[in-house]
Amino acid sequence: MSDQQTAAARSDLSASLADADAAYRDVDADIADYGEATVETVADAYDRATDLLDRYEGQATGTGRENFKNFIQFQDAFASLVEDLPDEMPGRDAFEAANDRFDKRRLSEDDFERARADLEPAGEVAGLLAERRAALERYREVRREVGHAIADLREDIADAERLVELGEADLDAPIEKIRDPIETYNDAVSEAFAEFKAETGAREVLSFVAATHDYSLVGFRDPPETLREYVETREAGTETIGDLLEYARYSNSKLDHYVEDPAALKRAVATNETYLERLDADPLQLAWPPEPAAELRWRVEELVSVVARFAPEAVVADLRDVQAVVRDAERFERLRTAAEAKAELSDAERERVASGEVAAELADLREQKERLEDVREEYPER
C-alpha cells in the first residue's frame, strides 16, 4: 500500500468512527423511546413465543392422538403467554394476531410460518437490544483501529525523525576517534577470551560464564545444568574445553583410558557440543555503530568488572580508553550519529532528506496523528 493509500485509509477511519457512533446513538435512541425495560419485556416475550413455535411445530401438526395432545398443550401455552402480556406493550397486537391463527381444531406448518410473520413487528422491537450490542461492538472495533493507526503513526514519525537526524549528520566528522578505541578493545578481548578458553580448565571457564549472570548487560547464555554439574563434580572438569570436546568424539573403549565414566562425559559434553563450540567473546564485545553514550557508559562499567576476571590488564586498559571517549557525551553523540548515518543511510535516503521530502512527510504524519487523536478524544470509550 502506498503512502497516499495509507493516509486515505487513516482518513476513512475518522469517518468510520463517526458513522459507528451515529449508528449506536440511533439504535440507543430507539430503545430510549420505548424504554429499556419495555424493550426487554418485548424481547423476553418474543423469545418465549418463538421458542414455543420451534418446539411444537413438528409435534402439534398432523393427525393422531399424540399430535392432538401436543396441539392442546401448545395452544394453551401460547394463549397464556399472550394473555399475560402488558396491555400497552409495543407489538402486543402482533402476538394476538399470531394467537388468532391457532384458534382452530387442527394446525399445519403454514400456520406456524404465518404466525412467525405476524410476530415480525414485535421481533423488530425485540431485536433492538441485539442491534445495539452489535453497534457498540462495531464502535469499539473502529475505535481500536484508530488506536492502532495512532500507534503506527508514532512509529512512522519516529522513523522519519530518525532519518532527518541522520541526514543532518556531519559525514566528515572524525568518527575514528570513537571507532578506533572500540575496535582495539573488541580485537583484544576476542583474543584474550579465546586464549582463556583454550588454556583454562572447563570448570573455571564455565564458572566465569555463570558468574556473569549477575551482570545484566553482559549477555552470556547460562551453561546447561548437566554440563556445569559434570565439570564441577568430575576430575575431567579440570581439562580444557577443547580436550573435553575431543574426548566426547572418542569411542567408549578409547575414552575409558582418559576418564572414569565415559558415558557420563558423553551425556554432559557431547549433548552440549554446540554450546561449547560457540562460546566466544561476542557477549563482551561492543557494537558498531555504538550504543548511546548513557547506555554504553553503564555497559562499559560492567565489562570492566567482568573482563578483569580473566583478561590481562592491557585489555582492561583498552576498555578504559573506550570509557574515556564516552565521558564527553555531547561529542560522543555527535560522532555516533555520524557513524550511524554512514552505516545506515543510503544515497537515496540522504537525497530525500536534503531535498526536504522527508521533512514534508514528517509534517504530514504529525498532522494525521493529531487528527486521529482528536477523533479518538471526540468519541470516547464506551
Image (tube, helix red, strand yellow):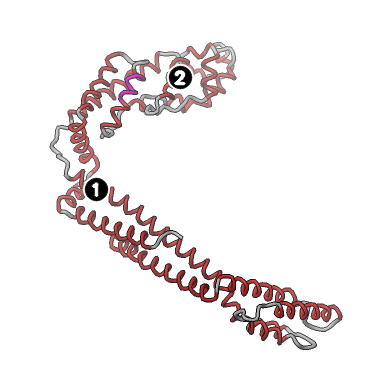
Q: Is residue 101 left or right of residue 23?
A: right
Horizontal and vertical percent position of residue 28: 49, 71
In the rendered structure, are the residues bearing label 2 and label 1 in contact, judged by CB atoms less than 8 Å apart?
Answer: no
Along the viewing direction, whichever of 334 and 380 lies nearer the viewer: 380
> Circle 1 is placed at which residue position?
161
**Which quadrant is home to the N terminus?**
bottom left
Tell which of 272 and 377 is nearer to you.
377
Residue 22 figure quarter: bottom left
Q: Residue at x 68, y 76 (%)?
A: 49
Give how far across and how far down residue 94 sits, in percent.
63, 83
* The magenta segment: 300-306
Q: Which residue is mark 2?
A: 206
Q: Residue at x 31, y 13 (%)?
A: 312
Residue 21 shows up from this direction: yes
| Residue at disc 2, secondary structure | helix
Q: Is residue 190 visible?
A: no
Name the disc covering residue 272, or none. none
Please check the rendered image and state whether residue 304 is part of the magenta-colored stretch, yes or no. yes
Labels 2 and 1: the sequence-earlier one: 1
Measuring 28% from the left and 27% from the top, which residue is drawn there? Answer: 297
Query: Label 2: few (<14), some or many (≥20) within 10 Å?
Result: many
Alpha carbon separation for disc pair 2 and 1: 44 Å
Q: Position of residue 93 (x, y in %)?
A: 64, 84
- Amino acid type indicated by mark 1: Glu
What is the crowding at mark 1: few (fewer than 14 residues within 10 Å), some, or many (at least 20)? some
**In this view, 179 is above or below 363:** above
**Magenta span: chief secondary structure:** helix
Kind of residue at disc 2: Leu
Residue 14: percent from left, percent from top: 35, 65
Q: Residue furthest bottom?
A: 104
The question of residue 49 being in magenta is answered with no
